[in-house]
Image (tube, grey):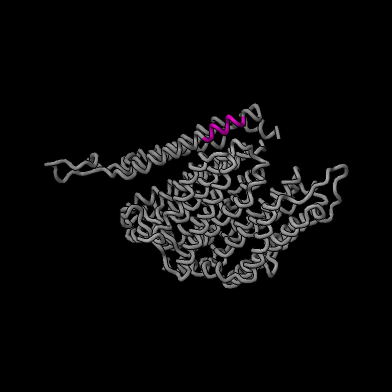
Amino acid sequence: MKLLELLGYFNYWVFAIILTVGLYAVISKSNLIKKLIGLSIFQSAVFLMYITMDKVEGGTAPIIQAGVKDQIFSNPLPQVLILTAIVVGVSTLALGLAMVVRINECYGTIEENEILDAD
Amino acid sequence: MDLLAHLPALQVIVPMLSAPLIVLLQPRGLAWAGATASALVSFAIAITLTLAVLDGQTLEYAMGGWPAPFGITLAVDALTALMLLIVTGASAVALLAAKPSIDQQIELERQPLFYSAWLLALSGLVGIVVAADAFNIFVFMEISSLASYILIAGGPDRRALPAVFKYLMMGTIGATFYLIGVGLIYMMTGTLNMADMEARLGDVTDINPVLVAAGFITIGLALKAAVFPLHVWVPNAYTHAPHMVTVFLAACATKVALYVLIRFDYMIFQAALDGHQIQFALFAMPLAILGILVASAVAMFEGHLKRLLASSSIAQIGYILLGASFVSIAGLSASAAHLFNHALAKGGLFLAVACLAYQYRDLRLSQLGGASTRMPWTCAAFVVCGLSLIGVPGTAGFISKWLLINAALGSGAWGWALVAIILLSSLMAVVYVWRIVEALYFLPPKEGEVAVSEAPMQLLIITGLVAVLNIYFGLFPQVPLDLANSAAVLLVEGTK
């Protein structure tokens, strides 16, 4: 029973694991592109959390149909929210990559320790 | 509806819509004029809103006419008005003075995009302040952050790029933590509207997710607000940014995150969680004290003018957090007053730095010799703002430090120790401000150097004006104090 309860939170476990994996990459890697990849993984974990919480068991898309009564709907709001958050994440990634390009132009490297040595 | 009723929305919309428009302006030199006009309009709106809420009422605005729990609302109360004044004021003042400095640092072709990013940063910051919806705050936070990354990286200094990259990493992690927290609260309450959240959290039976949310939101916002020890992105970002960007961001960017933190904590968590006041105090007070002492000590030994002032900013964030950690009306009004006064003092100091930087390439203290004879007005303004930063009587900084000391004395048996810490850090501020004054006034000029003269009139007049304001608000602090008081009453009473 205990185990099933834990497995019932499968998505949330995955959320926590992906979140940590992303954060670890951000902290431990010195290559700036790898850091950005880590950041993207970190952000996608949150997308998973939002998508998970909107699911209602047996629920379907919230569309009102003629003749269908007492239908259970999943909550559409978190999906809308996370769509916005995905856009934000993509913009952040794009800006981060642009910064890496500029850093590479100015320093000739994208390794963090070499950049620190250069100044 | 008359125009006044729409002002909360216009506050955000004016800079946001003018941002793309000024890119189209021809010739390119007009971009500055357009951006400044837009910033001044924002400032005027903020003043009008402040006058409307000065008697303690709250303005609410339902976007698109949809009422509160379903639609998105904007709300303006006393604390909001105070923050609006700081943000729009800092932006308007910095832009008014900016042209000579920006012309020197950023080539003409890129200027329209630069000013456009500036207005986006402004609209994002203003949006965070007026939004009454937790998710909207996240979106505006990212708008302002993305725009300020561009602003900081826009200058000629290549060291700004790694600094911005670090800021981007930490800022995104902070914002994502905030997003996780908001998600957890939404999971438990089914609402994003902050007032509604407060009401519904009372009925939540399983409080653990809310506790986790409080942790995520507090850490995320503390990262954005550069609370010690999450401040490591600040010194480099402020030091290598274009000088006028430093004026704007140092005066308001981290304070906005701190404002959201205080608002969330007081309005939502303290009402919903048992014993959260004590948890918050025990979390915030040690960090505030450490931040004040460590950052002041770092500033005492720092050799670069801008980096020194950036370290001092971290210490000042500590003061604001310290006031908030007392969880009392006196403490909060000291915090709110210090938000305003520090913006005034640090804005003035960085303006003076921009004046110096117009003539001096190298801003290390050892290179600034003879500045007082060549740039007497700039140095005078610097000294006045420096005194305000220290908290000398007669300047704005004194008012909030006095309030903070009073609040510390009223906070319990440990009050005396806190007062000792505040006095000690003020002495440290005397040391680091004195080191700058020594460099400006007593260091002999470098030999074989071309004679430099005063900064351009436009820059100088605005800098002088801010210095005068530092004295004015030290002698007549009524308006910011009224706002700070009613903000504090609103926040503390709201938790009961």
What is the magenta segment's predominant secondary structure? helix
Quadrant showing the C terminus of chain B: bottom left
| Residue B476 on image: x %, y % | 61, 71
Q: Is residue A63 left or right of residue A12?
A: left
| Residue B351 on image: x %, y % | 67, 53
Residue drawn at (65%, 30%), measured in percent from left and top? Answer: A106
Whether residue B326 is visible, yes or no, is yes
* Relative to B148, residue A96 above or below: above
| Residue B299 on image: x %, y % | 71, 53
Q: Is A100 in the magenta?
A: yes
* Relative to A30, residue B450 above or below: below
User: In the image shown, does B90 or B367 lie closer to the viewer?
Assistant: B90
Q: Residue furthest left?
A: A67
| Residue B229 on image: x %, y % | 60, 50
Q: Residue furthest front?
A: B27
User: In the image shown, does B367 or A23 lie closer to the viewer?
Assistant: B367
Quarter assignment of residue B107: top right
Residue stretch rendered in magenta on the structure: A95-103
User: In the image shown, does B473 or B3 lie closer to the viewer?
Assistant: B3
Whether residue B435 is visible, yes or no, is no
Q: Is B377 in the magenta?
A: no
Residue drawn at (32%, 52%), measured in percent from left and top? Answer: B190
User: In the image shown, does B145 or A56 lie closer to the viewer?
Assistant: B145
